[in-house]
Amino acid sequence: MAYQIGKCLLSERLRQAGMTQAQLAERLGVTRQQVSKWVRGQQRMTLESAKNVSVILDCYIEDLFEWIPAATRK
């Protein structure tokens, strides 16, 4: 089964970890504005960024996004 990336769940993961966007940005070496773009869905994280975020937040990359089953073509 194929999946499409849906909503970014970073805000929920940050809340669970007790971390702010600014704290995550500092740990990643990016701006708080960049993290805010991910949270608001204005820009998607690269695979590299998602992996680094998942390590910092102690979760799986899959936990950072909503996953929607894609319609398969026949």
Image (cartoon, rainbow, N blue to C red):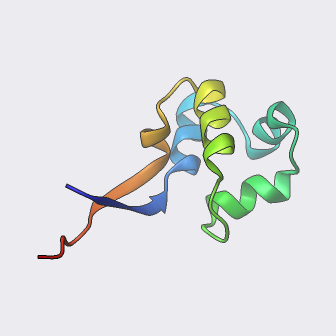
With 29 as the anchor, is 48 left or right in this view?
left
With 22 as the anchor, is 52 left or right in this view?
left
With 52 as the anchor, is 34 left or right in this view?
right
In the image, residue 71 sits, relative to residue 69, either above or below, namely below
Q: Nearer the viewer, residue 46 or 54?
A: 46
- Residue with the most extreme left position: 74
- Residue with the most extreme bottom position: 74
How many numbered markers are drawn? Answer: 0
Q: Position of residue 18 (x, y in %)?
A: 63, 30
In the image, residue 65 sits, relative to residue 40, either above or below, namely above
At a point 50% along the width and 28% down the height, the residue shown is: 59
At a point 74% along the width and 53% down the height, the residue shown is: 35
Q: Position of residue 3 (x, y in %)?
A: 31, 59
At a point 66% along the width and 26% down the height, the residue shown is: 56
Q: Position of residue 8 (x, y in %)?
A: 52, 57
Q: Nearer the viewer, residue 54 or 36?
A: 54
The answer to which image quadrant residue 62 occupies is top left
The answer to which image quadrant residue 41 occupies is bottom right
- Residue with the most extreme front position: 74
In which quadrant will I find the C terminus? bottom left
In the image, residue 45 sits, relative to residue 42, either above or below, namely above
In which quadrant will I find the N terminus? bottom left
At a point 53% along the width and 39% down the height, the residue shown is: 13
With 73 as the anchor, is 49 left or right in this view?
right
Q: Nearer the viewer, residue 52 or 8?
A: 52
